[in-house]
Amino acid sequence: MPPITLASVLQVVLALGLLNVWLLRPNKATGYRGGTARNLKEEFAAYGLPDSMFYIVGGLKLAAAAALLAGLWVPKLALAAAVTLIVLMAGAVAMHLKVKDPVKRYIPALAMLAMSAALALLAMSTALA
């Protein structure tokens, strides 16, 4: 079992959050969907993105979740996953801004962005040590 550190807690929280959204709740309405979307696919349409982006982003987020969990044993994977999530979550925030969502709707994306940035900094400091 890997040691419990702030980095490992962030990895698990981020991974479980991604898996929840993309595997357990993609067809559920929430108060955080962009625009007037009732599910994840409609949310991408609300942002004016093509269907292909739904699959690309979904694949990247699921791969990042897997890398975060594998990164508990292979730490270099955590840094790559965190950097990927920084880019994806910055894009998510930008999409919410594009459709003029209230801040409440993109708090989860901002939280994931902040946790991903913290994890990247922790992973870099560990790699440099």
Image (spheres, rainbow, N blue to C red):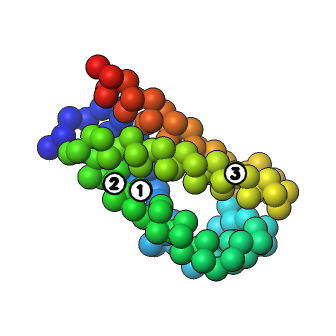
Residue at 30% x, 52% y is 69
Of labels 3 and 2, earlier in sequence is 2
Label 3 – label 2 distance at C-alpha:
22 Å
Using the image, determine if residue 82 lies above or below residue 129: below
Residue, far right: 100
Quarter holding the C terminus is top left
Q: Which residue is mark 1?
A: 64
- The residue type indicated by label 1 comes to Ala
Asked where in the image residue 35 lies, by quadrant, the reply is: bottom right
* Residue 32 x/y as whole percent: 68, 61
* Residue 103 x/y as whole percent: 77, 48
- The residue type indicated by label 2 comes to Ala
Q: Secondary structure at mark 3?
A: helix
Mark 3 neighbour density, 10 Å: few (under 14) some (14–19) many (20 or more)? many
* Closest to the observer, 22 or 124: 124
Q: Which residue is mark 3?
A: 93
